[in-house]
Amino acid sequence: MDDFRDYEYLARPAATGDRHLKSCEIRETAALIAASRAPQATPTNGEETRHAEVWPLSFTKGLPHDSDGFVDPKAFHAFVTAITEPDRPGLPHAFDVPLGPQAGLAPGGNTPYSYKPRPEYALGWRCTRRDGAPLTVRAWESPRAGHVYDLQGADASDIAMDAAPALGSEELTAEMAEVYALALLRDVPFSEISAGGTAFAPAGLSAHAAFTGLGRLAFLNARTVLDGLTPRQADRRAARFDQTGAFTPQTMFRGSTPGAQTGPYLSQFLLVGTGTCPQETREGLISYGANTIDQRVASLAPGVDHMVDFNSWFDVQMGADIKDLQTADAGRRFITTPRQLASYVRVDQLYQAYLNAALVLLVQGAGFDSGFPEGTGKSRAAFATFGGPHMLALISEVSSRALKAVRRQKFNIHRRGRPERLAAMVDKVASGAPGKLTTAMRAQLRTMYLNLDKAGLMAPVAAHNAAQLATHAARDGSYPLTGLGHEAALSHLLPMAFIEGSPMHPSYGAGHATVAGACVTVLKAFFEMFTTPDGWTERLMDSVGLGCSVEPNVVADGAKVDFDRSGTKLVDATDQTRLTIQGELDKLAANIAIGRDMAGVHFYTDYYESLRLGERMAVTILQEQMLTYPEPVSMRFVSYDGDRVLIEGTGHAVSVTIFGKNGRPVDYAAWLSRAAQAPVPA
């Protein structure tokens, strides 16, 4: 517990000068709280050093590559230097790094004056656009954000993440298998996935086959004893299992909290609207002042995947900007499949899903935390403080700070490559064309390939990629798909939902997941999650008129989903397990974060660790804001790890009290640094 009782405020008249002094005193105390947080040393998996000059799993997107897809070491070193070098006060940072093809400058690309690539790295695009327009280059997104400071909450260096899983680990194999499986299940309804059914297999893999195959992997098989796991790795493994310790269809591709694993796959907050009766809430229309928000979404076209041949994969690694060539589906529907959820998280605004959830809870009369001084009595209504405007503004506040914090992890520390890159390395070993991969790398990737094949994934991936090329290829080498060379028969590349592949920033941590972790923490802290002021029994969704769980309708034509008629309305969910508000909020965070895995742009650990980073950013902001309230205030919630968190302000002091799942007290500083190495020496 942090307690700043030494900095008590004296009762003073409300004179202008006295208020000014008190305001300064509060800011000084907030600075003392910030200073009390020790900088945390974030562990890395060491691969950037261990695999130097090859970097098979590092983020190299946008840099010059050779014909096998390996980055120019000179360019990679320049990239890392440009990211990590300190700012020069008063001067802009040029970020003068090689960007895009170096065989003639592509629009949007960059060739620094000092950069002279060797011939094997001075390559051009492999493909062209069908409309004849030149291919342009994407820029890296906020690569220097890790150097920016904030005036609220923990500094980006004060909260750590665990090391990403390393090549050769059972965990990395498992999460690559999950991403491959999700790619093949993109057009299978969530209700079918949760049931582990066999009715639909549009890409050659049913939900049941995915479950059976994934269960063969050591990391996802609860009966397999894995020695040498760190406590954090063991926690991530346990998060894949249910409360009895079993891996089931109900836990497959789900989040790490009990709420995320209960009931239908999708959170009700991604489906329902507001209203006074079920008929109204099932319309999926959310009241937003004088406007209305429709929960139906525009989706990418079903059955169309990208980057399934090496030439298009290569251009994307060189930074090709082809987002405008994405094929969309007509009409708007409720989210029914992984592809539709991936479509949502491709274009959503930073805190869109959490704003919608907040509006649903507000309109449905969820009520705020019983520890607030306003909104519970007769004479003081909550509005500017402890009311809707306060909470809605805070969602946006924590989202921006979470996004900047995770940028430091992405660029300054881990620089982890995206799943599309690891899949390409697997493909190189499988096809017998390993390029620069060392003997040790080949052996580890070969083992991964064999395990993925044992899980029943490699054959359907290759068949799906070949079918995609046969259906959509343009033999002139133009987008959206190409059929050049022998890749149609051999490719084990990851089929991507987005034509441009992953974003122009590293995989770990995940921006969507960090923002989800922060915003949902604010929602859980502001709204009342429990049935009594002094208890921890969670409120049911019934309490806000949303007791009957819903899911989108699914219409089938034999073994095929009729996408024109599916997702057009909400119906009673098959699983009517009673849901809690907190559980559905946790599920919402998981849905948005893991929706990025469904697109092929993130791994499970990106979600798991980033969610907790965002949670800690939010708690430190709430902690400091407690200083601004001149009367007692408290808020409480259950963390993503199952801790009971209580944040209190007395009008002159602030404390954060935490009890673990076992009921024992947890030191606040230890909770903040749960994923870190030892604190950095002062």
Image: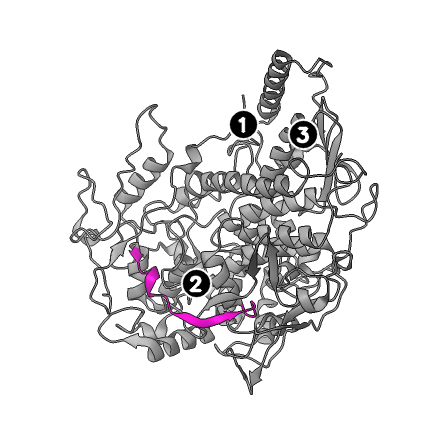
Quarter of the image that includes the C terminus: top right
Place of residue 469 in the rendered image (x, y in percent of width and height, measured from the top left): 34, 76
Question: Mark 1 or mark 2: which comes first in sequence?
Answer: 2
Give the residue type at disc 3. Answer: Met
Q: Is residue 50 left or right of residue 520?
A: left
Q: Is residue 650 above or below residue 493?
A: above
Residue picked out by circle 3: 626
> What is the C-alpha distance between the residues marked 1 and 2?
38 Å
Q: Nearer the viewer, residue 197 or 189?
A: 189
Among the 4 quarters of the image, the one containing residue 199 = bottom right
Give the residue type at disc 2. Answer: Arg
Which residues fall within the magenta stretch? Answer: 320-337
Q: Is residue 567 left or right of residue 632?
A: left
Residue 595 falls inside the magenta stretch: no
Residue picked out by circle 1: 680
Place of residue 542 in the rendered image (x, y in percent of width and height, measured from the top left): 77, 60
Residue 326 falls inside the magenta stretch: yes
